[in-house]
Image (tube, rainbow, N blue to C red):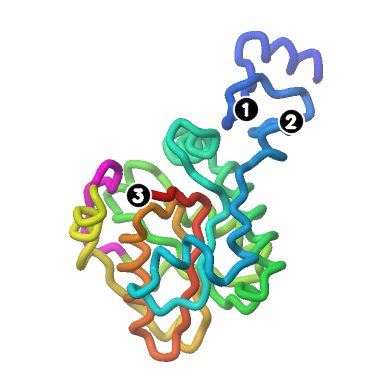
Amino acid sequence: MSLLNDFIGLFFPRVCDACENLLLRNETTICTRCLTGLPKTNFHKYPDNPVMETFWGRLKIESASSFLYYSKAGKVQNLIHSFKYRGKYEIGMMLGEMFAADLKTSPYFNNINTIIPVPLHWTKLKTRGFNQSEVIARGMAKQMNAQIENDVLIRRFATDTQTKKSRLKRVENVQGKFGIQNPEKIAGKHVLLIDDIITTGSTIEECANILLSVDETKVSIASIGFASK
């Protein structure tokens, strides 16, 4: 089988989705060098971190964290791009599991009951075939022994991509676009709201405010990438 794999590799080489260098025989998806060198934020260790500061004065949340620093043309962007646009679900699952393993060690995230991914509108879901935030959430739920709820937070209207929009335009782009159903599923629970990347936080803010409208519900926020402005 190894000889067959080597032969196939001549025509279809396996490369790291972070650095695009060839993978060794025992490596999958991400090479060992990139995996051990991921730019972790370690925000989960500190209650007052840059993600939390993003929402000061905007949201009443319990905790906030992002797993990795995200920069344009960087390795994390390469990973997210392969995940979202090339359908490599295993990247989202892997990063979700790794992130959750860190969150489990934090006193600020150890009482999460429910995980809710930021939803996609059905038109974009149909085009892409999956919700990247939901895939991440599935990886995290396995580690955190939490329940995923996909039918509570809904996207009522499609929005243009947030990429290249100013903070004001991002806010305007998502206002009134989300709604809630089956609120009894999260009443009195501590919810972890998941997105892939946090930049200005406009989408997360809109979603969190809707979840916080449910009686006695607490909300924490997490994302795989944090793109500081």
Query: Which residue type carries mark 1?
Result: Cys
Residue at 32% of width from left, 76% of height from top? 210
Query: Residue at 44% of width from left, 90% of height from top?
Result: 216
Which callout, 2 or 3, points to the residue nearer the camera? 2
Q: CA–CA distance between discs 2 and 3?
A: 31 Å
In the image, is residue 173 above or below residue 193? above
Q: Determine which residue is flagged by label 1.
A: 16
- What are the residue bounds of the magenta stretch? 155-165
Q: Residues within 10 Å of mark 2 (few under 14, many from 20)?
A: few
Mark closest to the chain's N terminus, 2 or 1? 1
* Residue ID for mark 2: 27
In the picture of the structure, the residue carrying the numbered disc 3 is: 125
Relative image position of residue 113 (x, y in whole percent): 57, 78
**Chief SS of the magenta region:** loop
Residue 198 falls left or right of residue 5: left
Give the label on residue 135, or none. none
Q: Residues within 10 Å of mark 3 (few under 14, many from 20)?
A: few
User: In front here: 101 or 37?
Assistant: 37
Q: Position of residue 225 (x, y in %)?
A: 50, 50
Q: Marks 1 and 2: in contact by CB < 8 Å? A: yes
Q: Quadrant of the N terminus?
A: top right
Q: Amino acid at mark 3?
A: Leu
In the rendered view, does 17 fall on the left or right side of 26?
left
- Spatial CA distance of label 2 from label 1 is 9 Å
Q: Position of residue 192 (x, y in %)?
A: 51, 70
Q: Marks 1 and 3, Cα distance to the nearest angstrom?
A: 27 Å
Instruction: Characterize the local packing of mark 1: few (<14), some (14-19) or many (20 or more) Cα atoms within 10 angstroms.
Output: many
Where residue 46 sits, quadrant-wise, is: bottom right
Q: Amino acid at mark 2?
A: Glu
Q: Image point 62% across, 27% down: which residue?
A: 16
- Left or right of 18? Residue 4 is right
Q: In x, y percent, where is residue 224?
A: 53, 52
